[in-house]
Image (spheres, rainbow, N blue to C red):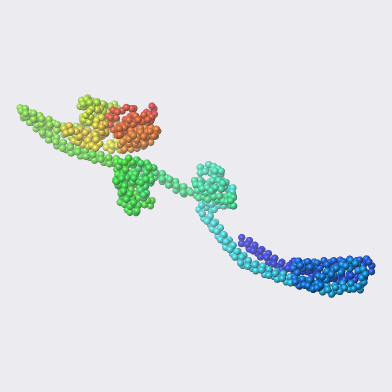
């Protein structure tokens, strides 16, 4: 570019110099042709010559010897006169056209007569002589003499002065022209000098600087392109490579010269990751070259020269010139590391999610503002709220009782402000708030992630633990009371032995005295009653020697054998019903104690039905699995024969249910009960390796369930069968209705683990609303006895009336009321139930409904 500039500068300067020199050399020619001064001088000189020639022609015409000769000279004279007149007119005309100077004006017209007049008069005389051909003239004629004198004396001097004047003016014009040329030359040289030093050299310097800056920018751009980690490839209008930086060459394995001129798509973008063909028409790069629209793509693959491939993030930008699309530039980067990191993060997130989902403990994460950001399935189960409902809400309003919310907020603000807290990392016990408003005991540990501003609490529902602890305390209390009672009864039995022995001896002494015999007999009866009372106390404390006499007992046969005695022991207003399973397992127990226990339970039922009612005695087989312990921690997994005694009496108030098995605790009037009947039943169940439970609803009745272990003789075979039993599962939608939230949650968990979709509600009215809005519910699993005047049977009946076709499975804690009110075909699952019992009952109910 600079060389071209220098060449152009030299050409301009050379042209100016040549033009100047040529002008200077040709100024004479220019002057001679530009001005008519020389021509005028020649005309003026010819005028002098013509004046002398006419005089000569006139004398020759006058002296001609023949007429023809005279006529020839007359013609020459006329021609000379005409030329002289025309020349004079030309001189006058051209001088005036050039701008006649005052001196020239004076020469032509200044004197009297003027040169103009003299010339015109001379021309007139010549023309007259030529016209007359000089007839009558002699060579010495005065007329010819006058013509000659006028030419010699007047015209020749005037014309001479005129020629001189023309020559002077010509010289003056040449001098002025030469001066102008010289000044022009100097001006051109000055302009050239000024242009060289003032324009061309600074311009050249600036251009050199701009060129150097341009070269540096180009070199810098090349360094940038060569140093970039992203691949950059330039494409022409048809998608052929016109540029590739080193990063692009390195990533695809082609040398830049191997790529130039080749189409990019079939070179590195020809196939999908699975090896299938990638049509060029579907390629976003072709779209950019066709429409000019930019694109950015992630998740596709480029192929290397060696046939391997790698994931890329690429984009294409259209290149335009004067508005016309001329190509595109493609930028891309290898995202193999990013993809691997993303997959690792996804795997980590999946692991985290699986841990959160599988965790038995609730995991709740909040931010500095106390807003929930993580709420795992265990938290949903414990607090009765869904994750979508909890995330984004303040944790204090969700799961913290109102009495502790302000303290929580203050502590959170204190830790968020950077202060230390003693609760971080410490195992704490507190109460939480369930969605239904009840408080639940919790155990939790809190960790703080200060870099992220997050707090994570690991929360465990210890309701079952608290129940177990309470049951353990009651058991220990009963054990302590039993030990104390046994010790007192043992000593008291010894005392009664002494008293009875002495009374019998005294009886012999007073045989003759009626009064003495009567008093001794009364004392002996009281002593024997004391002995019977002592025996009961010893039975409760498991120190009765008779308890060692266990035998293999058919409980159905034992109940049948006592049925007549039980009926006689009750009033006629009480109807006794039995439902004895013929396949009930035998149990190894003390039969007499079992009979006493059963009789005591029946008598208690009679007292609870002062206006009469129904007493139902049932036997059945029951397998208690580990899951059943969640409903009753005192239950030991195993196989049991279940003996249920249900009444339709007044029920037992909930506030005294935990005390009914304590010795001497009674709600009867003084003198109508010892308070030892249920204590003896409890002692018998524990001595037999079983358990006793009570379920009661005020105003509806009570059910006592006596769990007696299956005899060990055929237990092994049954155990094998139980282990081999595969629980039936399902995917249907089950609606669980129970006014006991814990029982409902346990049932929901059992069913969810079996594959069912579960919805839980706490009363029949809410269940009816759900049934009305969701016709896709397959099974209604409901408690029989529920508050607000709508029990399980009424719920089933109203569901049928609204046209809902779901199957129905009932459950109840006491069968007497349940069976007495039963009106439909629904099966009744006794409480407490295990996962296995529920699995089979639910499957039977759904399958039966499907068949019918």
Placement of 399 over or under 225, stated as above or below: above
Left or right: 365, with 487 as reference point: right
For the N terminus, the quadrant is bottom right
Residue sitting at 19 percent across and 38 percent down? 481
- Residue projecting furthest to the left: 512
Residue 48 in sight from this viewpoint: yes
Question: Hey, which quadrant is residue 728 in on the image?
Answer: top left
Left or right: 561, with 118 as reference point: left
Q: Name the spot of residue 595 as percent of width and height, x first.
A: 22, 29
Residue sitting at 23 percent across and 29 percent down? 609
Residue sitting at 23 percent across and 37 percent down? 656
Placement of 471 over or under 139, stated as above or below: above
Placement of 624 over or under 74, stated as above or below: above
Residue 559 in sight from this viewpoint: no
Question: Hey, which quadrant is residue 7 in on the image?
Answer: bottom right
Number of numbered markers: 0
- Residue projecting furthest to the right: 66
Q: Name the spot of residue 601 as percent of width and height, x first.
A: 22, 31
Q: Nearer the viewer, residue 743 or 393?
A: 393
Q: Nearer the viewer, residue 221 or 495?
A: 221
- Residue projecting furthest to the front: 112
Q: Nearer the viewer, residue 110 or 282?
A: 110
Q: Name the spot of residue 317 as percent of width and height, x first.
A: 54, 50
Residue sitting at 34 percent across and 53 percent down? 417
Q: Name the spot of residue 818 as percent of width and height, x first.
A: 29, 30
For the C terminus, the quadrant is top left
């Amino acid at each position: 570019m600079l060389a071209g500039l220098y060449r152009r500068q030299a050409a301009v300067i050379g042209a100016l110099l040549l033009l100047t020199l040529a002008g200077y050399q040709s100024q004479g020619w220019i002057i001679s042709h530009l001005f008519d001064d020389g021509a005028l001088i020649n005309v003026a000189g010819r005028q002098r010559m013509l004046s002398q020639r006419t005089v000569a022609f006139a004398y020759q015409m006058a002296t001609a010897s023949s007429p023809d000769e005279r006529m020839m000279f007359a013609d020459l004279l006329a021609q000379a006169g005409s030329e002289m007149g025309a020349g004079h007119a030309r001189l006058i005309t051209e001088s005036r056209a050039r701008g006649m100077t005052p001196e020239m004006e004076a020469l032509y017209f200044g004197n009297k007569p003027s040169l103009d007049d003299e010339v015109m008069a001379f021309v007139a005389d010549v023309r007259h002589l030529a016209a007359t051909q000089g007839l009558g003239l002699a060579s010495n004629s005065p007329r010819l003499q006058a013509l000659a004198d006028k030419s010699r004396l007047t015209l020749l001097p005037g014309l001479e002065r005129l020629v001189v004047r023309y020559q002077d003016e010509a010289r003056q014009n040449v001098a002025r022209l030469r001066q102008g040329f010289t000044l022009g030359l100097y001006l051109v040289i000055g302009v050239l000098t000024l242009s060289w030093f003032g324009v061309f050299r600074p311009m050249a310097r600036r251009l050199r600087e701009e060129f150097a800056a341009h070269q540096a920018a180009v070199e810098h751009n090349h360094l940038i392109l060569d140093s970039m980690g992203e691949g950059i490839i330039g494409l022409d209008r048809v998608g052929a490579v016109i540029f590739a930086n080193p990063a692009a060459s390195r990533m695809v394995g082609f040398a830049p010269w191997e790529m130039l001129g080749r189409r990019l798509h079939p070179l590195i973008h020809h196939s999908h990751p699975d090896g299938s063909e990638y049509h060029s028409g579907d390629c976003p790069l072709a779209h950019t070259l066709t429409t000019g629209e930019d694109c950015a793509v992630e998740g596709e693959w480029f192929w290397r020269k060696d046939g391997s491939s790698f994931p890329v993030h690429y984009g294409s930008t259209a290149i335009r010139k004067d508005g016309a699309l001329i190509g595109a530039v493609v930028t891309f980067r290898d995202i193999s590391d990013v993809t691997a990191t993303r997959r690792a993060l996804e795997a980590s997130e999946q692991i985290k999610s699986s841990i959160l989902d599988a965790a038995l403990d609730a995991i709740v994460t909040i931010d500095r503002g106390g807003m929930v950001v993580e709420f795992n399935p265990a938290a949903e189960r414990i607090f009765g709220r869904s994750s979508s409902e909890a995330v984004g809400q303040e944790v204090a309003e969700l799961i913290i009782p109102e009495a502790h919310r302000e303290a929580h907020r203050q502590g959170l603000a204190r830790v968020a402000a950077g202060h230390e807290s003693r609760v971080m990392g410490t195992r704490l016990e507190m109460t939480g708030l369930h969605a239904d408003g009840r408080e639940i005991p919790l155990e939790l540990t809190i960790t703080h992630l200060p870099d992220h501003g997050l707090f994570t609490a690991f929360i465990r529902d210890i309701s079952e633990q608290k129940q177990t602890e309470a049951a353990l305390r009651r058991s220990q209390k009963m054990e302590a009371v039993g030990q104390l009672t046994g010790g007192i009864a043992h000593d008291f039995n010894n005392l009664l032995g002494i008293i009875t022995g002495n009374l019998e001896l005294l009886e012999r002494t007073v045989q003759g005295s009626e009064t003495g015999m009567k008093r001794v007999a009364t004392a002996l009866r009281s002593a024997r009653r004391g002995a019977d009372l002592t025996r009961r106390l010893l039975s409760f404390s498991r120190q009765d020697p008779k308890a060692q006499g266990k035998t293999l007992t058919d409980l159905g046969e034992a109940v049948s054998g006592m049925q007549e005695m039980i009926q006689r022991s009750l009033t006629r207003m009480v109807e006794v019903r039995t439902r004895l399973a013929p396949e009930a397992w035998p149990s190894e127990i003390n039969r007499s104690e079992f009979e006493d226990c059963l009789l005591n339970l029946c008598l208690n039922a009679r007292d609870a039905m002062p206006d009469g009612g129904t007493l139902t005695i049932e036997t059945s087989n029951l397998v208690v699995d580990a899951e059943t312990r969640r409903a009753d921690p005192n239950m030991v997994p195993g196989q049991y024969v279940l003996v249920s005694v249900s009444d339709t009496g007044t029920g037992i108030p909930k506030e005294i249910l935990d005390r009914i098995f304590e010795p001497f605790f009674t709600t009867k009037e003084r003198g109508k009960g010892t308070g030892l009947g249920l204590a003896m039943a409890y002692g018998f169940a524990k001595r037999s390796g079983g358990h006793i439970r009570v379920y009661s609803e005020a105003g509806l009745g009570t059910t006592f369930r006596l769990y007696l272990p299956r005899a060990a003789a055929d237990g092994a075979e049954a155990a094998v069968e139980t282990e081999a039993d595969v629980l039936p599962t399902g995917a249907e939608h089950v609606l669980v209705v129970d006014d006991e939230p814990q029982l409902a949650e346990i049932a929901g968990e059992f069913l969810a683990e079996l594959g069912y979709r579960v919805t839980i509600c706490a009363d029949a009215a809410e269940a009816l609303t759900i049934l009305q809005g969701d016709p896709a519910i397959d099974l209604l699993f409901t408690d029989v006895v529920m508050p607000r005047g709508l029990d399980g049977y009424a719920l089933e009946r109203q569901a049928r009336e609204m046209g809902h076709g779901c199957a129905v499975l009932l459950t109840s804690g006491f069968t007497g009321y349940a069976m007495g009110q039963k009106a439909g075909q629904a099966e009744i699952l006794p409480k407490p139930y295990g996962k296995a019992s529920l699995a089979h009952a639910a499957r039977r109910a759904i399958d039966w409904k499907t068949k019918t």
